[in-house]
Structure formats: structure tokens, C-alpha cells
Image (cartoon, helix red, strand yellow):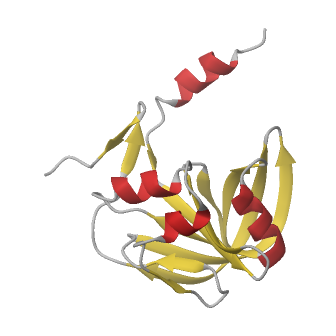
């Protein structure tokens, strides 16, 4: 039995996840970034994470060239940042008013994110329409706050105590 694309997408909406903006910077492509929900830790020793990037996304080209990326986990209230990086605008427009600084790898770290992981690419694996990019974390920046969540096609926040 084959699962339809719509059936699979509908099922995945039941998975609550944090919202990240994956960024990179290269000589050829400049600063690039996109909203990504497919993110996971892989290992603590060495510290590694993975992100899944659609092969049609231009941010993937920048990651290929620079061999680095940052995972910026968004904070509650950063819905506009998520939407800004979700597509439909140029890379330059995505970074307008975003506020960022270059990490030790050169990847852009968003100033107001809950957490930023500055990563060096260690492996890239093809999987269907996406690339699984594994990065070794070179530096971590954490701030206080609550994460922005995505569930059933909408942004959510953790309920108060």
C-alpha cells in the first residue's frame, strides 16, 4: 500500500515541532536563509545536528559552497521572522531587519533567536526530494525565553504554568 502525499502531509501536521531558520553565507551567494521544521540532534559526542533542505531551495546551494550553516531556533513571538524566511521573497529581503551577526564559521546567527547552533557540514545524504545535511556544532548561543512551535498548520506557544 502506498501512502498519498496529502495523507502523509496531513499525518505530519500532528507532529508539534520547533521552528528554525537555517542560514548560511558564502562568497558566491552571499547571505541565505530559510525556515525549516525538519531539524534534529544526531549525536552529543561529537555534537551533531541534522537539517533537511528541499533540493529546490537556493539556500542549499550556499551551504554546499560554504560548507557551514547555522540553525536558529525561533522564540515565541517570532512568527513574522518565520514567515519572512519561509519563501516568496528574495534572500536580501529575508535578511532585512532580521538583525544578525556572523558566527565563527561565517554563518549568520539571528540576534533574537532562542538559540543558535553554528555548524560545519560533515555529511550530506540524498533522501527523496530533500538533502539531509549533518553538521558538527562549532559554537552555541542560548538566550532566555520560550520556543515558537508549529502544530496543525499554525504557530503555537507553550501554555503558561
Give the image location of residue 46, x and y in percent. 70, 77
Q: Is residue 45 visible?
A: no
Q: Residue at x 50, y 74 (%)?
A: 116
Task: Locate residue 50, reporting x and y percent.
Answer: 68, 60
Toward the bottom, the furthest residue is: 104
- Which residue lies most toward the top here? 1
Provide residue 21's location: percent of width, then percent of height.
53, 61
Q: What is the quadrant of residue 155 in the picture?
A: top left
Residue 85 appears in view: yes
Is 69 positioned to the left or the right of 63 in the image? left
Q: Is residue 146 left or right of residue 68?
A: left
The quarter of the picture where residue 156 lies is top left
Above or below, 58 relative to 92: above
Q: Position of residue 153 (x, y in %)?
A: 43, 33
- Residue 18 relative to residue 43: left or right: left
Q: Is residue 138 above or below residue 85?
A: below
In which quadrant will I find the N terminus?
Answer: top right
Total tally of numbered discs in the picture: 0
The residue drawn where x is 62% and y is 91% is 104
Q: What residue is at 43 percent from the left and 40 percent from the top?
A: 16
Q: Looking at the image, which residue is at 59% across and 26% down? A: 9
Q: Quadrant of residue 48?
A: bottom right
Viewer-nearest residue: 8 or 89: 89
Amino acid at each position: 500500500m502506498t501512502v498519498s502525499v496529502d495523507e502523509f502531509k496531513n499525518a505530519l501536521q500532528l507532529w508539534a515541532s520547533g521552528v528554525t531558520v537555517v542560514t548560511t553565507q558564502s562568497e558566491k551567494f552571499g547571505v541565505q536563509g530559510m525556515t525549516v521544521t525538519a531539524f534534529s540532534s544526531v549525536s552529543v559526542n561529537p555534537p551533531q545536528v541534522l537539517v533537511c533542505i528541499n533540493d529546490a531551495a537556493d539556500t542549499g546551494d550556499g551551504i554546499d559552497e560554504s560548507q557551514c550553516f547555522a540553525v536558529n531556533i525561533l522564540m515565541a513571538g517570532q512568527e513574522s521572522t518565520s514567515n519572512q524566511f519561509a519563501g516568496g521573497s528574495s534572500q536580501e529581503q529575508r535578511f532585512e531587519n532580521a538583525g544578525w551577526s556572523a558566527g565563527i564559521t561565517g554563518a549568520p546567527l539571528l540576534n533574537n533567536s532562542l538559540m543558535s547552533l553554528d555548524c560545519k557540514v560533515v555529511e550530506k545524504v540524498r533522501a527523496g526530494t530533500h538533502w539531509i545535511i549533518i553538521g558538527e556544532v562549532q559554537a552555541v548561543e542560548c538566550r532566555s525565553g520560550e520556543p515558537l512551535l508549529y502544530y496543525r498548520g499554525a504557530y503555537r506557544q507553550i501554555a503558561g504554568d
